[in-house]
Amino acid sequence: MTDAATIDDTLAELIEDFDVLEDWEQRIAYVIDLGKDLEPLPDADRIEPNKVPGCAAQVWLASGREGDRLVFRADSDSAISKGNVALLLKLYSRRPADQILAFDAKAALDRLGLPQALTRQRANGLNAMVGRIRQEAMGEVRQ
């Protein structure tokens, strides 16, 4: 992804990737592979305030800023959760808060078929991750 790519461009790329996958098992394998590409999260970011409640596994989500853009870093102790958060970072990291808040994550994830490929608990965790990202963006808008 280039810095010039919009969130919709990134979603379109993900949709293309997902569309060539034949079934939910291949989609989950793809998501797990995304997680393998995440940069290691520093121990300093593996703190209680960065934990995402509502996830089946431990998920840490840290945020920062680069100019007017939010930058997210994340990790999980579960391969699937790590992949899910990596996918969300592809969509949301390095975006202005207003773009994050304007993006319909539910529709995007439904289009990818991801929630249907996950257990209910993991789908709830994915929604919790999106909620946490949106919460960080709302905090930026209020400042």
Image (cartoon, rainbow, N blue to C red):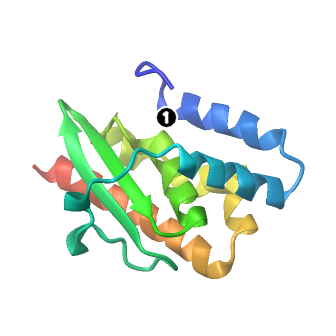
Which residue position is annotated with label 1?
7
Which residue is located at x 89 percent, y 49 percent?
22
Q: Residues within 10 Å of mark 1 (few under 14, many from 20)?
A: some
Q: Is residue 78 left or right of residue 52?
A: right
Quick one: 135 or 94, which is closer to the camera? 94
13 relative to 61, above or below: above
The quarter holding residue 20 reads top right
Q: How many marks?
A: 1
51 relative to 102, above or below: below
Quick one: 127 or 141, which is closer to the camera? 127
Residue 6 coordinates in the image, percent (x, y):
47, 27
Residue 108 coordinates in the image, percent (x, y):
61, 49
Which residue is located at x 46 percent, y 46 percent?
38
Element class at badge 1: helix
Q: Is residue 108 left or right of residue 100?
A: right
The quarter holding residue 123 reads bottom right
Which residue is located at x 42 percent, y 43 percent?
92
Q: Can see residue 113?
A: no
Q: Can see residue 82?
A: yes
Quick one: 35 or 132, which is closer to the camera? 35
Residue 107 coordinates in the image, percent (x, y):
62, 53
Q: Is residue 5 left or right of residue 49?
A: right
Three-letter code for the amino acid on which mark 1 is drawn:
Ile
Residue 84 coordinates in the image, percent (x, y):
56, 58
Tell which residue pokes out farthest to the left in this image.
143
Q: Is residue 42 left or right of residue 133?
A: left
Which residue is located at x 65 percent, y 31 percent?
13
Quick one: 131 or 2, which is closer to the camera? 2
Tell which residue pokes out farthest to the right in this image.
22
